[in-house]
Amino acid sequence: MKPRPRGVAAFADNADPRHPGRGPASPDAGRARSLRLATTMTTPTVTTARDNNAAAPVLAAQALACRRGARVLFSDLSFAVNAGQIVWVRGANGQGKTSLLRLLAGLSRPEAGRIELGASRARVYVGHANALKDDLTVAESLMFLSRLHGFDTSAAAHDSALQRFGLHSRRTAPVRTLSQGQRRRVALARLCLAPADALWLLDEPFDALDAQGVQALNTLLGEHAARGGSVMLTSHVPLTIASPAPITLALGEAASA
Amino acid sequence: MSAAPVFTAVLGRDLRLAARRRVDALLPIAFFAVAVSLFPLGVGPEPNTLRQIAPGVLWVCALLAAMLSVTQLYAGDQADGSLEQMLLAGGSGTAAAMPVAIAKAVSHWLLTGLPLVLVAPLFGVMFDLGGRSIAALCASLLLGTPILSLLGNLGAALTLGVRNGGVLLILLIVPLCIPALIFGSGAVSAIETGSSARGHFSLLGALFIATGLLAPLATAAALRIATE
């Protein structure tokens, strides 16, 4: 086996005005902003606006490693996500952002390391694929997903979820007739129905969304964090969430150094 | 999270999807009808010959109809991400994927196995089978088609993500279906020749129980591997 690249994760405050999320193009900046190399268990020192760090983390990863075929995507990755935090997983294509989220969601098992969940074990994973069936209507798709996961199935909650994403008028339309952005909105609408303290794992949630959709999602993310929920998301576009300030988890940036 | 909501949600959705695509849902039955009808044309309309080959022909065609309809059971759900969500809903681990595997097998049986049982008497008449033989045919298919659905389900999960999965599925799973075929068609032949079919039915029942216990577990494990 090849020697493993030492995947280094760093939590950095994303408030740096000079680099508003230029991402993997600026590895130097990424390293300079690193608060701490995560070779051991790292609890981020960045606190949220509401300062509710005292409680046990919602999710803690210890020395995680992930392999795809012969290639080690990352190893020795440790971090913790606390209640009320939004964590932005960054990294170039192929650095293992999606693989990390799938590990945390429980879809795959880590090559090494441990994932510990906090008191609320509820996790909502919205992957690249929208998990919608062409032949079902918007309302039926949403109902299927919330039944499946044991979310709120009341009609009122579903109506308001669709309204938030501007899909209420299209609730009886077959998914087949929706655009890519509208499908994304349906997939994200189920976030409104999940338990309040759930950990959201979102893989490129802003994909295909228009400005209005991005706005709706930003509001939703902010509200979720404000009521003590936490979010881990990947995005190739800079985040525009007003509050709380997202915490950056960089994958593989320092590995090339 | 408990298993029942996952089971009912997946089963309900599959049945609803089938209702939306009625033509697709009727294809296995159409295949069965066409394949069975070829035999009198090919073999010749001699009633004694037809009566003799009827149990085997009907059972083989039912088996092939079940295998052909099962190939795409998980492929669509995997492509659009539904499968991931279904597997996540149960929690982690192999056992948690079992409600999905069972729901898929039940929906496949309701959509292909049960209709086959219902149309079988018609084709029994076509082959000039007697009343008791037709009853035995229906009973053997009622016990046997769930075995085919469970094994086909396992094959679909094992060949998920494999190119030309359909052919591989048939190569993998048809050998496993042979006992069901032997005892299923044997039961009808026994009645047709005037002997008792109790032994055949007992063995078919035992096969059903064994497959019902083991196949969902293996399917669940295969689904976990396929989505990893």
Image (cartoon, coloured by chain):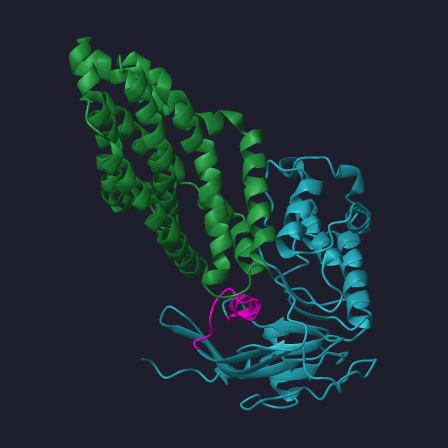
User: Which quarter of the rendering shows the N terminus of chain A?
Assistant: bottom left
Residue A190, picture quadrant: bottom right
Left or right, residue B130 beside residue A246? left
| Residue A159 on image: x %, y % | 80, 46
Quadrant hosting residue A50? bottom right
What's the residue at 83%, 80% (across, down)?
A: A49
- A76 or A198, nearer to the observer: A198
Estimate the x, y position of residue B153 in percent, counting from the top left.
39, 45
* Chain A, colour shown: cyan
Q: Is residue B44 visible?
A: no
Image coordinates for residue A77, horizontal then vertical, percent: 53, 82
Q: Which residues are magenta?
A: A95-111
Question: In the rendering, what colour is chain B?
Answer: green
Q: In the rendered view, would you say A72 is above or below B102?
A: below
Q: Residue at x 37, y 16 (%)?
A: B122
Question: Would you place residue A191 above or below residue A227 in this image?
Answer: above
Residue A98 belongs to magenta span: yes
Q: In the rendering, at what x and y percent does residue A217 appear? A: 76, 59
